[in-house]
Image (tube, rainbow, N blue to C red):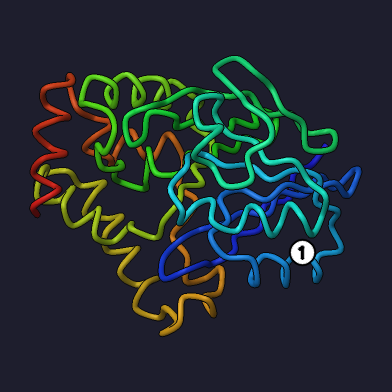
Amino acid sequence: MSLRIERIPTLSDNYTYLLVCEASGEAAVVDAPEAEPVIRRVDASGARVTKILSTHHHWDHSGANPELAERWGAPVFGHVSDAERIPGFTDGLDEGDTIRVGEEEARILFIPAHTSGHIAYVFDAAQALFCGDMLFAAGCGRLFEGDAGMMFEAMQKLGALPDATRVFCGHEYTESNLVFAAHVEPENAAVAAKLEQVRKIRAAAAADWHDATPAEMTIPTTIGEERAINPFLRAADADELGERRAAKDSF
């Protein structure tokens, strides 16, 4: 089995993902705020979209759900608690549930903190994690609807995934996150090396994010790499994570 993952630049710095089961041609769209770039990519790929997946309700991850669902006759999935908040919602998921894209299967992790109904999709066989705005490359999401204790628990859950798990997050925030990480851990050689690498990648970035090429994207990273560079995943406890998140908010 093989899951092809296509990164689609949306809005000004969002990542939408097209997941294609190579064996069946079935596909799912993850976190789509605008329809046109997604439709264009799906049409070019020849994939058959059978599911729309949302990690959380924020419009910049779900705004295009109704249009895409209507176009392809596809159900819209999200956390059970977000039935009234995710546009186009049809099917609820919770911790321990599974969902299939063709022959590929994902298990659901419930990871509230950024929002109260945030989930992640973990495709173990494909070594791929889709975590929305909870875990970023070298960062984490703001605490809009949860607290530091919830975020710490979520980070522990995500950090327990295998090192090789690829992290597909919701935004291209990597460079700014690494600048903060270097501030928090100035002696961390892994952070310094990653920041240098990312700055080279982003120096060539397209003026219009919609025109970005894979060479200009810093995502995915891996869980193993995040353990080395992410100050929130590396926090010793909820208090330290909360202090770091508050500092990042005003950094």
**Where residue 11 sits in the image (x, y, percent)?**
47, 69
Vertical order, 247 against 218 (above or below) = above
In the image: residue 76, left or right of residue 85: right
**Where residue 219 sits in the image (x, y, percent)?**
47, 55
Point 26% across, 38% down: residue: 144
Point 57% across, 47% down: residue: 87
Q: Secondary structure at mark 1?
A: helix
In the image: residue 235, left or right of residue 36: left
Which image quadrant for residue 133?
A: top left
Screen quadrant of the N terminus: top right
Question: Disc count in the image?
Answer: 1
Point out the residue furthest to the right here: 24
Point 80% across, 51% down: residue: 49
Dot 1 surroundings within 10 Å: few (below 14), some, or many (20 or more)?
many
At label 1, the amino acid type is Val
Between residues 115 and 173, which one lies in front from this camera angle? 115
Vertical order, 51 against 17 (above or below) = above
Between residues 94 and 218, which one lies in front from this camera angle? 94
Point out the residue furthest to the bottom here: 207
In the image: residue 198, left or right of residue 20: left
**Where residue 74 sits in the image (x, y, percent)?**
78, 46
Vertical order, 199 against 176 (above or below) = below
Point out the residue furthest to the top here: 96
In the image: residue 193, left or right of residue 32: left
Point 32% across, 18% down: residue: 153
**Where residue 246 sits in the image (x, y, percent)?**
11, 40
Which image quadrant for residue 79?
A: top right
Q: Which residue is mark 1?
A: 42
Screen quadrant of the C terminus: bottom left
